Image: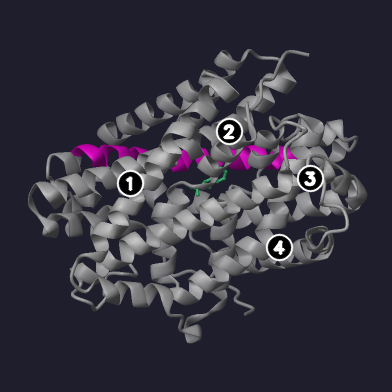
């Protein structure tokens, strides 16, 4: 068998996996979901899901990957359950769909670097026109995809790991600097309050589904990204502690991103927090307005740094999204890595074109479907997001843990987890993981999956 490569150290793996986890989901998605979902009540749900449910799923994915040393489909074959490789295939499809629209958003963010650097804060009022200029934003997306492909083509330790080791610490530095800055502004405390003091009367069914979807998406779970990265992990590494670091890094960065954005919104709205529910436009419309009100070269500097940071975060995630189908094509179809990378990246870029056009340019893609019971139509990008993130990820996660506990069997999972973790057997962590992987996670994820499908696509809200 050809040498598949691997991470050069435990730290390298943690950085790359944390890089996969930390992305647009944390810095763009998390704050807007918090804003729409009632502030701190959403945050509390999100934390519960991350630690109690998602952590066990993450551990399981990494263990399946490391045991088999295979891509998301090959892993199931290797373990002897060929029929189950449908879960891996679904994961690859999901990764392809996510990357197709994720790259569009990353392209917008990339273009904003130039807008901020040239003090064009007025872009905030013209975001609608900005995304309509499809040749320009299409080109930004193309550049972003090409950079992603370049990193992936350099292989696991030479490309993915190297990029993550450089980008992740830079990201942390930039984001902490922005938090400190935002705290110096007037009315910043109104934002902090909104963000950190929960009002549980705001906790509705959709807050719960969204928190679940957000936790899954943010931790890169449910589609085999961590099976794939896990397949490059050394047998001597401790999977439990690695997964704990990755979860903490991801949750930590999301929380810090909130600490950066909500004080800024407090400042701009003079403490009323009125802009906070703007949804996906939050960072493309509201933030530039804020940078504009800071004014002068400070505003331009802060704005530029913010979008550079966002692009760094997005890049380590797009790299992991691309690696999932690429490693499948390399392992199973015997294509050379370089060729596989450019072919797959090109294809995914094309699949992303409807998402690019569906923001007003094309009537058809902008009003792509109307769900049963909905008042208005949903655009193509949001539709992809609902199908992939909100639906396929929890379903994939549910099937992966069910598979590990009841088909592959939890004794085998335990065996793999104990490798490199001498104190694992007999520990409290082992007991909790056994319970969570066998019962808690499959039941809760299965339920959330059904409730989400009913609520999103059929307008039936059972809770
Ligand atoms: N976790 C990434 C983010 O938060 C997105 C992602 C999802 C990456 C699934 C890989 C797999 O932006």
CB of residue at label 1: within 8 Å of ligand 1? no
Q: Residue at x 72, y 37 (%)?
A: 237
Q: Position of residue 454 (x, y in %)?
A: 63, 68
Q: Is residue 338 left or right of residue 411?
A: left
Most extreme residue toward the left is: 296
- Residue 421 marker: 3
Give the camera-side residue of 88 and 258. Answer: 258
Q: Earlier in the sequence, mark 3 or mark 1?
A: 1
Marks 3 and 1 sit apart, C-alpha to C-alpha, by 34 Å
Identify residue for label 2.
12
Q: Residues within 10 Å of mark 3 (few under 14, many from 20)?
A: some
Identify residue for label 1.
174
Marks 2 and 4 sit apart, C-alpha to C-alpha, by 30 Å
Pair 2/4: label in front: 2
Magenta region: 87-114
Pair 3/1: label in front: 3
Mark 1 lies on a secondary structure that is: helix
Give the camera-side residue of 366 and 194. Answer: 194
For the question of whether residue 362 can be seen, the reply is no
Pair 3/2: label in front: 3
Magenta stretch: residue 102 in it? yes
Q: Residue at x 33, y 60 (%)?
A: 260
Identify residue for label 4.
445
Q: Quadrant of the C terminus?
A: bottom right
Mark 4 lies on a secondary structure that is: helix
* Label 3–label 4 contact, CB within 8 A: no
Pair 3/4: label in front: 3
Pair 1/4: label in front: 1
Q: Position of residue 108 (x, y in %)?
A: 31, 42
């Amino acid at each position: 068998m050809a040498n598949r490569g691997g991470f050069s150290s435990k730290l390298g793996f943690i950085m790359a996996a944390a890089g996969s986890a930390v992305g647009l989901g944390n810095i763009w998605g998390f704050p807007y979901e918090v804003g729409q979902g009632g502030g701190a009540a959403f945050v509390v749900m999100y934390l519960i899901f991350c630690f109690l449910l998602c952590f066990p799923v993450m551990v399981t994915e990494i263990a399946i990957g490391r045991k088999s040393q295979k891509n998301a489909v090959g892993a199931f074959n290797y373990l002897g359950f060929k029929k189950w490789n449908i879960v891996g295939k679904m994961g690859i499809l999901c990764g392809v769909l996510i990357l197709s629209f994720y790259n569009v958003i990353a392209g917008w963010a990339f273009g904003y670097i130039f807008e901020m650097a040239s003090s064009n804060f007025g872009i905030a009022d013209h975001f609608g026109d900005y995304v309509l200029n499809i040749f320009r934003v299409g080109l930004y997306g193309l550049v972003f995809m090409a950079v992603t492909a370049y990193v992936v083509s350099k292989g696991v330790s030479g490309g993915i790991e190297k990029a993550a080791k450089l980008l992740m610490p830079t990201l942390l530095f930039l984001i902490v600097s922005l938090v400190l800055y935002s705290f110096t502004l007037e009315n910043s405390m109104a934002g902090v309050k909104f963000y950190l003091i929960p009002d549980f009367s705001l906790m509705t069914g959709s807050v719960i589904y969204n928190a679940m979807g957000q936790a899954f998406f943010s931790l890169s779970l449910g589609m085999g990204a961590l099976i794939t990265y896990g397949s490059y992990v050394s047998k001597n590494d401790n999977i439990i502690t690695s997964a704990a670091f990755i979860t903490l890094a991801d949750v930590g960065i999301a929380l810090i991103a909130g600490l950066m954005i909500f004080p800024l919104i407090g400042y701009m709205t003079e403490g009323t927090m009125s802009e906070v529910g703007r949804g996906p436009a939050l960072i493309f419309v509201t933030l530039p307005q804020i940078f504009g009100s800071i004014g002068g070269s400070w505003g331009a500097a802060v704005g530029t740094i913010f979008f550079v940071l966002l692009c760094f975060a997005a890049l380590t995630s797009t790299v992991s999204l691309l690696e999932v189908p690429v490693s499948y094509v390399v392992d199973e179809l015997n294509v050379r890595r370089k060729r596989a990378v450019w072919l797959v990246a090109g294809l995914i870029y094309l699949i992303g074109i409807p998402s690019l056009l569906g923001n007003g340019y094309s009537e058809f893609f902008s009003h792509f479907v109307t769900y049963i019971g909905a008042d208005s139509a949903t655009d193509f990008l949001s539709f992809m997001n609902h199908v992939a993130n909100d639906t396929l990820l929890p379903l994939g996660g549910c099937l992966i843990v069910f598979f590990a506990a009841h088909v592959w069997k939890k004794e085998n999972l335990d065996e793999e987890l104990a490798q490199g973790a001498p104190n694992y057997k007999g520990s409290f962590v082992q007991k909790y993981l056994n319970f969570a992987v066998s019962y808690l996670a499959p039941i809760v994820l299965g339920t959330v999956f059904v409730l989400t499908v009913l609520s999103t696509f059929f307008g039936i809200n059972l809770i």
